[in-house]
Amino acid sequence: MEAVEMNSVSLKRPHSEDDGASADEIKRQKILEKSKAGSDSGQSIETVTEQLKDIKSEMIPNDESEEQEEEDLGDSDEDGDPESFADMMKHGLTESDVGITKFVSSHKGFSGILKERYSDFVVHEIGKDGRVSHLDDFSVPVDDEVNFEDPSEETFTVLSDEDKQRLEELQLFKNKEASVAIEVIEDTKEKRTIIHQAVKSLFPGLETKTEDRDGKKYIIAYHAAGKKALAKVRTATDPRKHSWPKSRGSYCHFVLYKENKDTMDAINVLSKFLRVKPNIFSYMGTKDKRAITVQEIAVLRITAQRLAHLNKCLMNFKLGNFSYKNYPLKLGELQGNHFTVVLRNITGTDDQIEQAMHSLREIGFINYYGMQRFGTTAVPTYQIGRAILQNNWNEVMDLILKPRPGAEKGYLVKCREEWAKTKDPAAALKKLPVKSYQSYVWNNMVSKRIEEYGLRAVPGDLILKGATAVHIEEGDVDNYTIHDVVMPLPGFDVIYPKHKIGEAYKEMLVADNLDINNMRHKIRDYSLSGAYRKIIIRPQNVNWEVVAYDDPKIPLFTTDLDKLEGKPLPVLPTDGKFRALKMEFSLPPSTYATMAIREVLKMDTSIKNQTQLNTTWLR
């Protein structure tokens, strides 16, 4: 198997490896000159933190609260004005800018549009037991403990929005009143019981009593034992114990089906509706925004009934497949994700498509870090990471504060959010994307490795035995294939290949004014230990089908929600104006579906290039 160059396969902008290399060399030279100037200036992290204090008025909070570095697809702000976003992409990165230049297959590339509609990209999480998450059941489980009853459906609707607002302010000690009075309009014992139950269920920490005032009945809500008791009640580890059956698991697990929302946005919305803190939710991985995704979520001591009620209020969300268990979910505890992707308006012949998909199934694709790893604006994240590792704080500040077109998201928002929350310059700087530089180096080195040695294991390559990397010796080379070979992300706790590529790592870091033998940083969070990553990934469960269609807006497959709602399969013409490739495959965690799709199309998957192909998907 021989690697294939990237030239002449992009629809609008052919890749030129020589151009990319020379451009990168110029960039590196500039960085080298700037880093020398920065070191001469004597500016330190302490000086930078002082500068951050001076710009604190610029730091604004944002709803995003966790990094999503290992996403399968990015979270670029694609839902803003199409013209301004397209304008921003004129300054964006292409694949060759971040070292993505090689292919493994020999078929002739063809064009197609990725994510013309967000519903063209569906992700189903694969749990650690190998089970694929599906939303196929809205029913609420029944408790074995017959003496306990969950709140009735009316519990969630009996309080007005105004009542809920007043009760929340009382619960959080935000008003001056010691209690809130709710008039019972229809005075029956059943009605009063429902209001009592609603207050206690929805606003932990409040107690209620009934009072007569001027011939009318009122439910009075008040704090039972002051702020100390409230603080105890509202912690994630100690919710209202008396209201939870002993036989029921403490965590309600459910399947979250979402459309065009990222995972953290979804959890923030659920938290707001449930009036709880987001940290009582747990999950195994974050999922794409511009997609339909299905994943498992766990929440501490929130009933399935309360969760199911949200299906009536939420847009682009559905919750189901409820169960109670005694444990939360943990990040990374998944086998991967199963993707269903539609590439519209394809130009390839049936023979090209068959060759491409057979190659994907039998050989796989280069396990590059995808474009979303490196940001979508004029300042790539790896440049900031490189400047941090160089201790070139002038350059860091220039890159952070550099004006750029379009919306700002990702690392800069996280940095600003941390500053707004803590006013701690060091903590804010820790949100910067140092690991993006490692990914940039890895991509470039893998391209060089494949160019030098092709798709075969050679002496000096690295393979993993358990968690330990060892070199392939001359006498053992026939025992391994390219699918066994790993390459290191640079760091202080990894070893490097014993052939030309080992030296290439050193040369690249020297060009960036870094010492490969000293990857520890005086700021601990920026010390890079390194890791190992497989060169080639072979997807599992690969299937495909070519379909014809006339209407570009018609869905080309049914989702879990379509099936639950009984929607029929779309009726497609046998001889339509357009053709689409429907493909399915499963990938392990921390791999990028866009890189698998890139191998099939043999074209640049960057948003910049896709925008040039067709801007309709941005609307």
Image (cartoon, rainbow, N blue to C red):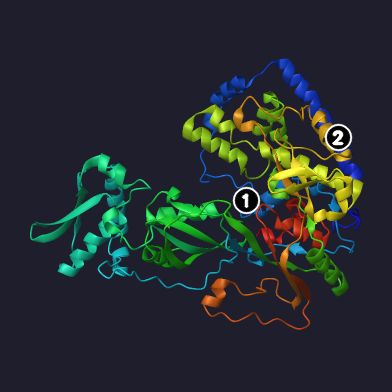
In the picture, measured across the screen, residue 529 lies left or right of residue 184, that is right
In this view, 84 is above or below 53: below
Question: Within 10 angstroms of label 1, few (less than 14), some, or many (20 or more) residues?
Answer: some
Q: Position of residue 37 (x, y in %)?
A: 76, 19
Q: Residue 77, which numbered label?
A: 1
Q: Residue furthest left?
A: 215
User: Element type at marker 1?
Assistant: loop
Report the side of 203 relative to 501 (left or right): left
Tell me the quarter of the picture where residue 36 sits.
top right
Residue at 64% x, 32% y is 526
The quarter of the rendered structure image containing the N terminus is bottom right
Furthest toward the front, the residue is: 475
Which amino acid lies under the numbered mark 2 shown in the image of this protein? Glu
For the residue marked with disc 1, what is the amino acid?
Asp
In the rendering, at what x and y percent does residue 258 appear? 54, 62
Q: Is residue 233 above or below residue 598?
A: above
Residue that appears at 39% across and 66% down: 309
Give the CA distance from mark 1 to mark 2.
Answer: 39 Å
- Residue at (67% x, 49% y) in the render: 84
Please provide percent x and percent y for residue 292.
60, 64
- Asked if one can make out residue 66 in the rendered structure from this viewpoint, the answer is yes
Q: Quadrant of residue 557?
A: bottom right
Report the disc number at residue 503. 2
Q: Residues within 10 Å of mark 2 (few under 14, many from 20)?
A: few
Q: Secondary structure at mark 2?
A: helix
